[in-house]
Image (cartoon, grey):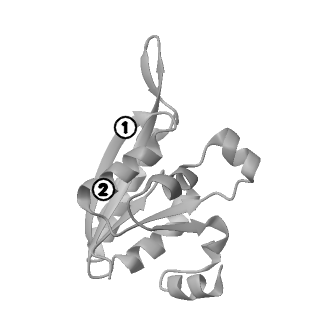
Amino acid sequence: MFKTVIWATDGSEAADTSLPYAKELATGGALVVVHCKELLAGRGGSYPVLADDDELQAKISEQVETLRGEGLDVTLRLASSHASGAAHVIADVANEIGADAIVVGTRGHAMIAGLVLGSVTHRLLHIAPCPILAVPSRVAAYGAGDAERAMVAGA
């Protein structure tokens, strides 16, 4: 059913929680891992929003190599955007490659915190060209292979 699945990750624990779902949906197809470095523009140039973004990119690259070692057809797409532009970058990649689904994690912020902090997942729900599977961080108790059971159980 899904030929091309995007796993959008910022390197966080919430994103890692969604990886088993992305792997399961991409079985027999292609998995495209997308990471967007968000930049703040200032007088002296642009600076990453996250000070540890280089370490996050290294972690994500290791995850991609592990996925390849598991036999998955995986591609890594690194991109940059202005702060709060990650959702648009992910949607653009999905449109460009003809993705069948995007899998993302959620941090479980309340509505007000989401407004203040921003929510890539929330924005994707409005602009993505394909279905979104938003995996709540509370489903971390489910292991790989339990994705279908968690979806049915409404975890």
- Which quadrant does the C terminus fall into? bottom right
Between 116 and 105, the one nearer to me in the picture = 116
In the image, is 2 to the left or to the right of 148?
Answer: left
Which element is circle 2 on? helix
Residue 55 placement (x, y as % from top left): 44, 44
Residue 30 placement (x, y as % from top left): 26, 71
Q: Residue furthest top?
A: 43
| Residue 11 visible from this viewpoint | no
Which element is circle 1 on? strand
Please tell me in which quadrant of the rendered image residue 7 appears.
bottom left
Between 81 and 76, the one nearer to me in the picture = 81
Location of residue 28 with respect to 17 vertically, above or below: below
Location of residue 145 with respect to 74 vertically, above or below: below
Location of residue 78 with respect to 26 vertically, above or below: above
Q: Residues within 10 Å of mark 2 (few under 14, many from 20)?
A: some
Location of residue 127 with respect to 100 vertically, above or below: above
Residue 15 placement (x, y as % from top left): 52, 60
Q: Residues within 10 Å of mark 1 (few under 14, many from 20)?
A: some
| Residue 77 visible from this viewpoint | yes
Residue annotated with mark 2: 95
Query: Along the polypeptide, which appears first: circle 1 or circle 2?
Result: 1
The residue depicted at 32 percent of the width and 82 percent of the height is 1
Eye-nearest disc, 1 or 2: 2
The residue depicted at 47 percent of the width and 75 percent of the height is 21
In space, the residues marked 1 and 2 are separated at their CA atoms by: 17 Å
Residue annotated with mark 1: 80
Name the amino acid type tagged 2. Asn
Between 106 and 146, the one nearer to me in the picture = 106
Residue 50 placement (x, y as % from top left): 52, 36
Name the amino acid type tagged 1. Ser
